[in-house]
Image (cartoon, rainbow, N blue to C red):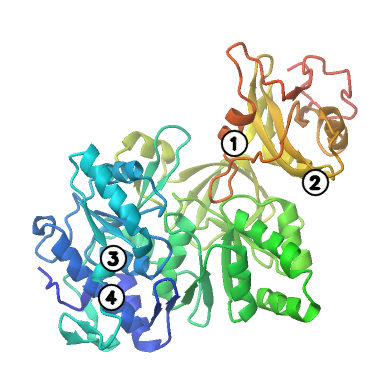
């Protein structure tokens, strides 16, 4: 078995990159004021092997083979941490024993943490310093409610001493030349490296299992870049960037996930990459308009120069509204790159770039390198993908795994996409982003986009709601703009009449009151099923609440009936 004191790391691409970068890059690679760390590669490598030593102590010897690899039967180790230095070290130390990491949210409930540990049959949970109070709650809950044995350990207790003369197991801090690759310590590329839990449409979260090859590829950056790290690492975007940028040699700086903190660091200059989910780009926009724009010109210019100096400004997680993209493109002067992917694809499947036609709404750009695509039908339909990062299976769910792939191994995204020339256009989710109205299939994003552009509407969401006569109908939830308090369903339909075909117009309206919010998940995706349940609950008799204004869909001719060709898509009588 590999000696716990060994400075030799597994024979895998990610560890080879770490050692190579350590020999060529003397700079700070990870700056994290929350942990009091400005880590260089020697410091990082030292902490990885130091924590790995503790992992061998904290786990039963029976879990390892003769080469120090954790056995494949129980490879999962839970990590509860924000995006910080401790998470990076913990993740790489876990990988260094051949194990797989399972990142959990820093705000997870104790009963949820216990559930995930039981699902993964995990024996060990590593906890970052900010999450230690939560760790105590998890431990108490587990002892009171389960026979499952879970060893909970602080990550910091496995790191080297940061004050005085740094030592490792009694020896002075090692240099980058003291680390090497153990050619006997190989880990099959097909073995698990990561589980990310993602919400399913029904039932408990699904465990998306990625193989070791997930960490084999870089991030398209260089050691000249500076990346602001602020996204949670239990989501695919935050995790992939945080770990892969370390392997790439790209400097990361941890900042608070808030608009003032991000704008403040941007103002200092030197940042080249900023990746945010949609809610953060909205928050940054509001902070600019409310706080920065009123400043004197010379003060405001420092913020703008910092933002305009970005080499990469990227948005992901969902399809942003055109108005958000327009603000950043026209008012600030930076076109946001849009990435399309999900937990299962392991990274972007599509991305826009400087060649993308910015005037095309819902444009996904073109497939990333290494991505193979095909449609369910011709140049339109559900998009199927193969990527280098594609997940291998859902944890303990053979049926769901089988259903997620085509017979020839493509992942079924559940998204409808069309192709126009070289560009791919997002049309919506197959499950929630289309309304089946009589015999028509209505893309909610098209309706939502037009609705949000009305002067009377400050915020909009469109969902499918059950209907006794039409199977489902188009339901709109809106927050009215100031001065438009008397708008109703008729006035909104009238305003949309020259923008949408008649059968696509909303037939149910719910106006948001003060304090009411449209439910969404962290990534910015609207939780449409929750929206329907919250604002359009259907009674046993099939009726909707009194706050919902309804259109008479039985009479197609009265009150603003068909006025132009194709209002009913040539399918009158459905």
Q: Residue at image x 35%, y 34%? A: 399
Q: Residue at x 62, y 67 (%)?
A: 260
Q: Earlier in the sequence, mark 3 or mark 4?
A: 4
Left or right side of 374 for 320: right
Counting from the top left corner in percent of width and height, residue 521 is at 54, 45
Q: Are marks 2 and 4 in contact (CB under 8 Å)?
A: no
Question: Of label 1 and label 4, which has the lower sequence position?
Answer: 4
Number of the label disc, if any, that sits on residue 47: 4
Residue receiving disc 2:
453
For label 1, the SS is: helix
- Give the residue drawn at x 42%, y 51%: 107
* Between 111 and 417, the one nearer to me in the picture: 111
Mark 2 vs mark 4, foreground winner is: 4
Mark positioned earlier in the residue sequence (2 or 4): 4
Which disc number belongs to residue 155? 3
Percent from the top left, x then y, of residue 206? Answer: 39, 41
Residue 12 placement (x, y as % from top left): 28, 69
User: Could you tell whether 10 is left or right of 105 in the image?
Assistant: left
Mark sitting earlier along the chain (1/2): 2
Query: Residue 528 got which mark?
Result: 1
Give yes or no for contact between labels 1 and 3 (Cβ–Cβ under 8 Å). Answer: no
């Amino acid at each position: 078995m590999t000696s716990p004191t060994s400075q030799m790391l597994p024979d895998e691409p990610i560890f080879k990159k770490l050692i190579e970068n350590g020999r060529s890059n003397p700079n700070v690679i990870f700056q994290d004021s929350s942990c009091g760390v400005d880590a260089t590669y020697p410091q990082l490598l030292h902490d990885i092997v130091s924590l790995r030593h503790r992992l061998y102590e904290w786990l039963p010897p029976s879990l390892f083979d003769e080469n120090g690899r954790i056995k494949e039967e129980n490879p999962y180790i839970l990590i509860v941490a924000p995006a910080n230095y401790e998470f990076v070290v913990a993740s790489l130390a876990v990988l260094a024993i051949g194990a797989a990491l399972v990142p959990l949210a820093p705000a997870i409930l104790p009963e949820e943490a216990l559930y995930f540990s039981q699902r993964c049959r995990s024996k060990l949970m590593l906890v970052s310093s900010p999450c230690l109070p939560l760790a105590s709650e998890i431990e108490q809950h587990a002892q009171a409610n389960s026979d499952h044995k879970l060893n909970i350990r602080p990550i910091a207790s496995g790191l080297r001493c940061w004050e005085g003369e740094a030592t490792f197991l009694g020896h002075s801090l090692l240099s980058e030349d003291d680390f090497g690759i153990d050619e006997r310590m190989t880990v099959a590329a097909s073995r698990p490296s990561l589980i990310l839990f993602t919400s399913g449409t029904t039932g408990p979260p699904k465990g998306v299992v990625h193989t070791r090859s997930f960490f084999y590829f870089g991030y398209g950056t260089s050691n000249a870049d500076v990346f602001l790290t602020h996204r949670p690492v239990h989501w695919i975007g935050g995790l992939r960037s945080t770990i892969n940028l370390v392997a790439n040699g790209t400097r990361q700086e941890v900042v608070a996930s808030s608009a003032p903190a991000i704008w403040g660091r941007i103002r200092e200059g030197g940042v080249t990459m900023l990746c945010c989910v949609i809610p953060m780009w909205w928050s940054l926009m509001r902070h600019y308009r409310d706080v920065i724009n009123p400043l004197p010109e010379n003060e405001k210019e420092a913020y703008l120069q910092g933002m305009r100096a970005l080499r990469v400004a990227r948005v992901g997680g969902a399809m942003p509204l055109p108005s958000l993209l327009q603000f950043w493109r026209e008012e600030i002067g930076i076109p946001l790159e849009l990435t399309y992917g999900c937990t299962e694809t392991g990274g972007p499947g599509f991305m826009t770039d400087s060649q993308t036609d910015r005037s095309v709404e819902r444009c996904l750009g073109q497939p990333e390198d290494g991505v193979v695509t095909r449609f369910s039908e011709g140049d339109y339909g559900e998009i199927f993908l193969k990527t280098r990062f594609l997940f291998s299976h859902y944890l303990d769910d053979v049926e769901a795994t089988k259903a997620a792939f085509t017979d020839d191994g493509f992942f079924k995204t559940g998204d409808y996409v069309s192709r126009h020339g070289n560009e791919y256009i997002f049309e919506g989710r197959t499950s929630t982003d289309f309304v089946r109205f009589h015999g028509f299939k209505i893309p909610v994003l098209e309706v939502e986009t037009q609705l949000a552009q009305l002067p009377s509407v400050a915020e909009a969401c469109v969902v499918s709601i059950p209907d006794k006569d039409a199977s489902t109908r188009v339901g709109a939830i809106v927050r009215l703009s100031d001065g438009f308090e008397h708008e109703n369903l008729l006035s909104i339909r009238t305003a949309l009449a020259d923008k949408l075909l008649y059968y696509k117009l909303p037939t149910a309206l719910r106006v948001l009151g003060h304090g009411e919010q449209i439910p969404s998940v962290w990534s910015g995706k609207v939780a449409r099923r929750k929206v329907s349940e919250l604002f359009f609950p259907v009674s046993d008799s099939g009726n909707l609440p009194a706050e919902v204004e309804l259109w008479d869909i039985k009479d197609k001719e009265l009150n603003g009936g068909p006025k132009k060709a194709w209002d009913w898509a040539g399918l009158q009588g459905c």
